[in-house]
Amino acid sequence: MILFGYRQTVKELARLMAQCRNCGMQGWQVVFRVLTWFTLFFIPVLPLWISRKVQCGTCGTVQKLSKADADAMIAHAGAHH
Ligand SMILES: [Zn+2]
């Protein structure tokens, strides 16, 4: 019997002070990547798709980002370090 399924892993990419698109507050915005894996016997073997999201530290809203938007926010976060 073959056991297969899906698993998601989340990795934080950047954290920056910016205005939230949802609540309009200036606060911490956390950019993260969600990777969905195909798993065999509970072991991730194949990454299926990647999505990028941002979560507002003030209101907690999670919004989807395009790759370009995510890259721009990561670059912006990096500029302060
Ligand atoms: Zn917000």
Image (cartoon, grey):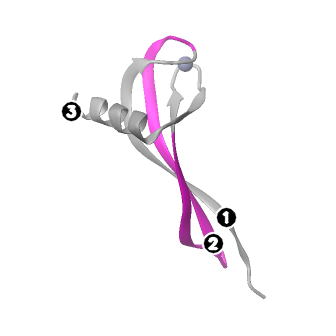
Q: Residue tagged by mark 2?
A: 39
Q: Which mark is residue 6?
A: 1
Q: Is residue 59 magenta?
A: no
Residue type, mark 3 in image: His
Q: Looking at the picture, how far across and down is residue 43, in whole percent?
A: 59, 74
Q: Which mark is residue 81?
A: 3
Is the residue indicated by label 1 positioned so its CB lies within 8 Å of ligand 1?
Answer: no
Q: CA distance from mark 1 to mark 3?
A: 36 Å
Secondary element type, mark 2: strand
Residue type, mark 1 in image: Tyr
* Magenta residues (range): 23-52
Tell me which image quadrant ligand 1 sits in.
top right
Q: CA distance from mark 2 to mark 3?
A: 37 Å
Q: Looking at the picture, how far across and down is residue 66, in whole percent?
A: 48, 38
Q: Main secondary structure of the magenta part?
A: strand
Question: Callout 2: few (<14), some (14-19), or many (20+) C-alpha neighbours within 10 Å?
Answer: some
Secondary element type, mark 3: loop
Which circle, 2 or 3, is nearer the viewer? 2
Secondary element type, mark 1: strand
